[in-house]
Amino acid sequence: MTPTSKVFYASEPTLDVAEFRRVLVESGLGETRPVDDEARLKTMLGNANLVLTARLDVEGKPLVGVARGVSDFSWVCYISELAVSASAQGLGVGKGLMDEARRQLGPSVGISLISIPDAVGFYERIGMKRMTDAFWFSRKH
């Protein structure tokens, strides 16, 4: 990413599965997501009702970040992925995606997510409150 590149944030409910997969892999989240199961990735995108993207304002408009969530648009939104390509990490793209989520959801909608251990500091730095009372049923596959 060049220092003069601008990042544009948008809602992209029909995001291409290959682009989504690429950013998951480049971000490091590919280790915890089913990146080799295209049908499952397609279903993940298709059933999300909030898909936000970060694209560079250069030729080809490459995707460098994705926030995917599920919301009732009234009370809460669960962000299931916040993925930023390694080449764009540290440049404000993750914060930009979360700011865009807050803008689109409005002030009356809370946002929750489960962080990977390496990203906890990022969420604290952008002002998210750590919650201790979260619960989880594990996937079987």
Image (cartoon, helix red, strand yellow):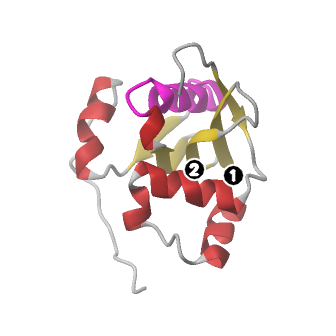
The C terminus, quarter of image: bottom left
Residue 87 image position (x, y, % from top left): 45, 37
Name the foreground residue: 135 vs 114.
114
Q: Residue at x 36, y 24 (%)?
A: 126
Q: Secondary structure at mark 1?
A: loop
Residue 93 part of the magenta-drawn span: yes
Indicate the quadrant where residue 112 lies: top left
- Residue 2, position as x, y percentages in the image: 54, 21
Instruction: Give the CA distance from mark 2 to mark 1.
Output: 6 Å
Dot 2 or dot 1, earlier in sequence: 1
Does residue 140 appear left or right of residue 124 in this picture? right
Image location (x, y in percent) of residue 113:
41, 48
Q: Position of residue 33 (x, y in %)?
A: 45, 67
- Local crowd at mark 1 within 10 Å, few (<14), some, or many (≥20)? some
Residue at the spot of label 2: 69
User: Dot 2: few (<14), some (14–19), or many (≥20) neighbours within 10 Å?
Assistant: many
State the residue in front, 40 or 110: 40
Mostly what secondary structure, the magenta segment? helix
Look at the picture and state if 72 lies above or below 100. Answer: below
**Amino acid under label 1?**
Asn
Residue 87 against residue 69 in the figure, above or below: above
Q: Are marks 2 and 1 in contact (CB under 8 Å)?
A: yes
Disc marking residue 89: none
- Closer-to-camera residue (5/75): 5
Any magenta on residue 98? yes
Which disc, if any, is residue 49? 1
Residue nearest the viewer, comparing 73 with 100: 100
Start and end of the magenta stretch? 89-107
Task: In the displayed orientation, state which residue is furthest to the top.
Answer: 4
* 128 is higher (above) or lower (below) than 42: above
